Structures are given as C-alpha cells and as structure tokens.
Amino acid sequence: MTSVLASVKGPEIDWAAFSPLLGLFGGALIVLMVGLSSPRVIRAHGVPALTIAAFGATIGLLIWEWNEQVSLIQDALILDRLTILITLLVCVAGIASTLLAWREQAAREIAHGEFFSLLLIAAGGMVVLAASRNLVTTFVGLELLSLPLYILCASRLRSERSLESGLKYLIVGSVGSATLLYGFAMLYGATGETDYAGILTQVVKEGLMGDALFLAAIGMTIVGLAFKASLAPFHQWTPDVYEGAPTPVTAFMSVATKAAALGVIVRLFFTALLPGVDDWRPAWIAIAVISILVGNVGALGQRSLKRMLAFSSIAQAGYLLVGVVVVTELGAEAVVLYLVVYLLANLAAFAVITVRERETGSDAIGSLRGLGARSPILAGAMTLAMLSLAGIPATAGFIGKFRLIEAAADGGYTWLGIVIVVGSMISLAYYLPVVAAMWRPDTEPGVDPATGRAVLAGGAQEAEAERGGWEATLVAAVMGAAILVFGIVPQPLFELVGDVLKGFGTG
Amino acid sequence: MNINWFLIVSALMFALGAIGVLVRRNPLVVLLCLELMLNAGNLALLGFSRMWGDGDGQIFAIVVMVVAACEVAIGLGIVVALYRRRLPIDVDELRELAG
C-alpha cells in the first residue's frame, strides 16, 4: 500500500502563486462558517466585513506576485499578467458589490453567510476561468462562476421576479455551457489534446485549419462563450435577468462576468486557436457588429434603468470584442483597459440605482428625477458614469474607446472603429435623458416625482438616507472620482495594462 | 466499432435536448433536456477518448457529470421555491419580466 502511494506523484503546486485562489475559496468557507453564528450583528455586519477582508487579502496576495509568471498544477492554470489584471478587476467588483449588498433584502432572505460565500465562490470561478490553460479547467471555471450566480439571482426568495430571473438564467446559461462543452469535445476529438499548448502544436502540425471537425468545434465554442458574455444574437436573457436579480448581484454580474469571459476569449483564441485565426475572425467580427447595433438600439426607449444598462452592456461587450478580433498586443491591452473603465462606470451607476431603489422601490428612470438638487454626490457620480459609458472626453470612458479605435485602426479594421463611433452616437440618445432627468428641477415641489406621494418634511429625508445606506454612496463617490481622475490623467491606466500578453509566447 | 456511430448518437442526443429546451414548457422537462445536452457532450468525449486511446476525455466526462448534478440541484431548488410561491409551473407563464 505504501509503495503504491509512494509511486503516485501529485502535481507540483507553487503555493505562493496559487494563494490568490486560496484567498477567495478559503474566504468563502470562513464566511459560510461565521454566517452560522447566532448574534445578529455578526451575521449582518461581521460577514460582509469578512467578505471584504477576503477580497482585500486576495488583492494583497496578487500584488505580491505582480511580476511573476508561473504555471500551476501541470499547466492547468497559469498566473501571468492577464490573470492578475482580471483577478484585480473581479476583486474590486466584489468589494463594491459587497458594500452595495450590505443592507440588501436578498442577503437577509437567503442568510448572509450563504449570500456572501456564494459571491466569493463566483469570484473564484472567474479567476479559474481567466487563468485556465486547459479545456477541463476552463469548463470547471465557467461552471464555478455560473452556478453561484444562478442562486444569487434567485436569492430574493419572496420575489417572483427574482426567482424567474434565476430560472431563466439557469436555463439559458446551461444551454450555453452544454454548447461550449460540445465544442470542447470536438476540439479534443480533432486534436487529441485538452491543454491549450498541446492543441496549438497539434493544429499546426496536422494543418487542421479548415478541417470540418475543427471548424465545428470553433463554431460551438464561440456560441457557448457568446452566451456567457451576453453577446448578440445570444443576448435575449440579459435584460430579464439583469432586471429581476437583486441590484448588487446585477452589478457584480455585469462587470465581473464580462471581465472573466473576455479574459478566457483572449487566452483561448490568442493561444490555442491562433493558427485558425482566419476561420474564427469573421464570426467574432459579425457578433461584435450585431452586438453594438442590437445593444444600442435595444436600449432606446427602455424605462427601467437596469434594463437600459443590460442593453448597454451588450453594446459594450461588442466594443470589447473589437479589441479581440484585431489579434494584436495593442488590441489585448485595449480590451483590458476598456474593462477597467467599464467597471468604474457600471459600478457607479449600479450604486446609485441601489440607493434610489431602496428609497423609492423602483428602478425607473423617473426615480432619479430631481436627484441633483437633493443629493449632488449621487447625481454627480451617475452623470459621470453615463458620460463615461457614452465616451465623452475628460471621462475614463473616452480614453478606453480611444484606445479601442486606435487598436482597430492599427490592426487594419478602421471600419470597425467607425462602427464603435456610430454606436456611441446612438448611445447618447439613451444616456443623456438619464442625466437630464437628474438635473432638471422638480416641476411640482413637495411631491416626490418617483412615487407621486407627498414628500414629508426633513425627517423623512433623513430616514431615506438611513435606508439607502452610506456604503452605496461611498461606492458611487469613489467610482465617480476614479472616472474623472483617470479621464484626465490616464497614464497610470496605460502602465497598469501594459505587457498584458507577456507570457503568451505569441504575438 | 466505428467512431462515427458514437458521434451520430451524440449529435442526435444534443439536437433532441436543444429542441426539448426550446419547445417543452415544464421546467422539470427543460432541466431533463439540459441534462441530455450535457450527456451528449459526455458521449462525444468518451468516443473521442477511445479513438485517441488516452484517458483525458474520460476524466473530462467525469468532471462534467459532477457539474451536471450541481446544475440540476440548483434548478430543482429554484423550481421548488417557485412552487412555494404558487406560481404556475410553466415557463410560458413566466412573464413578470417582459422579454
């Protein structure tokens, strides 16, 4: 027995490089345990505080490994610059969503420990996905991020819309996973390998470009990933799920899932499938153009802010794809840069929506009316977020779009840059009314325009501020300030995303 | 046995599952059809694994089985929660969110 055990050799694991993942998953376990304790104050406040500590510890461990480039567990995962940047984005989104969820009804309904540990597990899944260099770990990472999100979407157990959004997301997400799995099975059938490096060697050696099985594999992989990244024409679930899910969960989903999905698209298509670039490029170009058009046109005329941001996120995902299809280092850098500015704007917007939803019980655009006079900080953050999403100069969004268009022109796809500009022009038609609604003075003073009820004197306002919570306001203020600072001084951003492809071993 | 037979059966299973998800109304049947799609992928993996004569595909298939079990558990949990809310167990009736 001992001799058998001695002959079995486990894979080498570099624990230092593996530690960010352990931070997230260990944090999830601790949060789940602490959530069982009986004092209510520990459950309601200790658990979210611990969650933030876990995300913070992960960021700390990452910065420790900043310049490392280590392959983990026999090349199943890799810690390189792309992994580190995506993990950083996911953790920042996680901290912001935890702050937004601090007083959330949903966290109380399914118990705080469960809610926040699911959030940490989903974040861990995103890191696994972005770091994976093997078809098996890619699939596991994808499911590890999806499964907790299905539950989180349905976490307001007494709300029909929340349950409905959870079930819809589960069904559509599982169709996406099954399609992706079938694509991976064919990829394995065509090459006989499951790790990206092996697939790359086989594709080049056997000259599989244009091979029917290989093409079918690429097609199904693209469809599966497009479902996950909510790209048109596989986007129909997005508005429903975004609207029905609790707002902090929507905030996390819209930002972090997109970062992880784009991370895996860049890694899979820039390494394993790079020789087949002429096979997959037209498909991604078509999806990018359709997403930009469908997202921007669909957002016009939406009255719910969450639905509007859902359509806008489809369009933003289309912009991001432009950086992928040029297949250059500049393109990959532009993608990560745009992910950062998209994160700042979306989190600021969802923080404001969270506050207003708690105060008025609705996420209609009308609920923002008159916000500028009552709460200039929230209104200012929302204004900056909308302008940044539209790509107005002096906001971070302009820098991001500028880089994407530059990458498109540099890669010989100037017309895709023009599509981005046209899309941004359409988008002004739905971002600007939000800004206008906030700063236009109330027509009927004394009546709350959102609810139509008479506003009581000062005391009610204070009670409202109490329900909204200072945490969400803090998130909005910090993200809004970051949008402005990075819009004026973008140099730190450029330095952050530099060398993103370092360690890919390819162009 | 020729690998083609495995692939034909698995493609049929995948298509049946996809059609089922699209046309069936009961969420329980939809969950069954999702299982069918995932297991079609498993069958393809096992066929290819046999063709290449290595174990990678088999290990992948075992991992997929675990994932599929988790998915169904969550799906059933949500269906039970919906039932407790006395909502109609029919995906067409889920129109609270206009999609």
Image (cartoon, grey):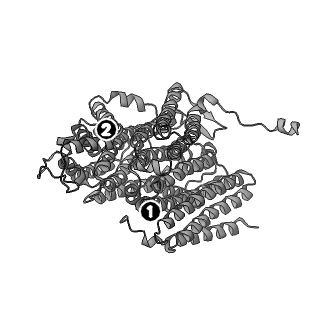
> Quarter of the image holding residue A332?
top left
Q: Is residue A303 above or below residue B93?
A: above
The circle on residue A250 is: none
Q: Are marks 2 and 1 on the same chain?
A: yes
Kindly indicate whether the residue at mark 1 contacts the one at mark 2 (C-beta within 8 angstroms).
Answer: no
Q: How packed is label 1: few (under 14 Cα within 10 Å), some, or many (20 or more)?
A: many
Residue identifier under label 1: A164
How far from the left and from the top, in percent, is residue A300? 26, 58
Foreground pick, A204 / A143 = A143
Q: What residue appears at the point 75 percent right and 54 percent down from the top-left corner?
A: B53
Residue A391 shows in the view: no
Image quadrant holding the N terminus of chain A, namely: top right
Instruction: Identify the element where label 2 is drawn.
Output: helix
Q: Is residue B90 above or below residue A229?
A: below
What is the chain letter for disc 1?
A
Above/below status of A284 relative to A126: below
Provide the residue designation for mark 2: A473
Which of the two residues, A297 or B26, is positioned nearer the viewer here? B26
Q: Relative to A350, is A280 on the left or the right? A: right
Residue A124: name its quadrant: top right
Callout 2: chain: A
- Residue drawn at (36%, 37%) of the image: A471
Q: Residue at x 40, y 43 (%)?
A: A103
Provide residue B92's location: percent of width, then percent of height. Answer: 44, 72
Q: Looking at the image, can residue A245 be seen?
A: yes
Q: Position of residue A308 (x, y in %)?
A: 30, 55
Callout 1 secondary element: helix
Residue type of the residue flagged with mark 2: Thr
